[in-house]
Every structure is written in structure tokens, then in C-alpha cells.
Image (cartoon, rainbow, N blue to C red):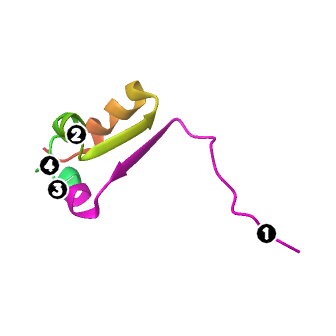
Amino acid sequence: MKCWPYEYYDRDVLFIIDSKDFLKLVHGKLDPVFAFTVGKLKVEGDLGKALEIQKLIKK
């Protein structure tokens, strides 16, 4: 029997970011809009929901 990896597509938004940049982001040292603009943060899906991450970031 073969098992194939399951691709989970039932999501609103997917963030792709380097671990070092992620730590900067959650500690408030990297603005998510700036990170997106310069390509450090990639977003797939609903950009409106992606912007809600700012509510979770320490200021």
C-alpha cells in the first residue's frame, strides 16, 4: 500500500517566512507590511485576513 502526502488546502491564508524573520516579526522588530513588500514574507490566500496578524504582534 502506498501513502501519499495530504495537501491541506482548507485554509484562509498561508504565511511563508524565514525562522529568523518570523522571530523578529512576532517580537515587533519587523513590520509585516514591510516584510511583505521587500519579499521577506510571502502570503498565499486572503490578504485581508493576513493583515489581521498585526493585532497579534507585540508593539
Q: Which amino acid is tagged 3?
A: Lys
Whole-number angstrom distance, CA of label 1 to CA of label 3: 37 Å
In the picture, measured across the screen, residue 11 lies left or right of residue 2, that is: left
Residue at x 83%, y 71% (from the top left corner):
2
Q: Quadrant of the C terminus?
A: top left
Whole-number angstrom distance, CA of label 3 to CA of label 4: 6 Å
Mark 2 or mark 3: whose residue is earlier in sequence:
3
Q: Are dots 1 and 3 in contact, CB under 8 Å?
A: no
Q: Which amino acid is tagged 1?
A: Cys
Residue at x 14%, y 48% (from the top left corner):
28
* Figure check: 6 above or below 40: below
Question: Mark 4 Cα within 10 Å, few/some/many (few <14, many 20+)?
Answer: some
Where residue 13 sits: x, y (%)?
47, 38
Magenta stretch in the rendered image: 1-23
Question: Mark 2 Cα within 10 Å, few/some/many (few <14, many 20+)?
Answer: many
Where residue 11 sits: x, y (%)?
57, 40
Numbered tag placed on residue 28 in the rendering: 4
Where residue 39 sits: x, y (%)?
24, 42
Q: Which amino acid is tagged 4?
A: Gly
Please give the residue where the numbered disc 1 appears in the rendered image: 3
Please give the residue where the numbered disc 3 appears in the rendered image: 24
Q: Which of these two is toward me, 24 or 40?
A: 40
Numbered tag placed on residue 32 in the rendering: 2
Residue at x 10%, y 50% (from the top left corner):
29
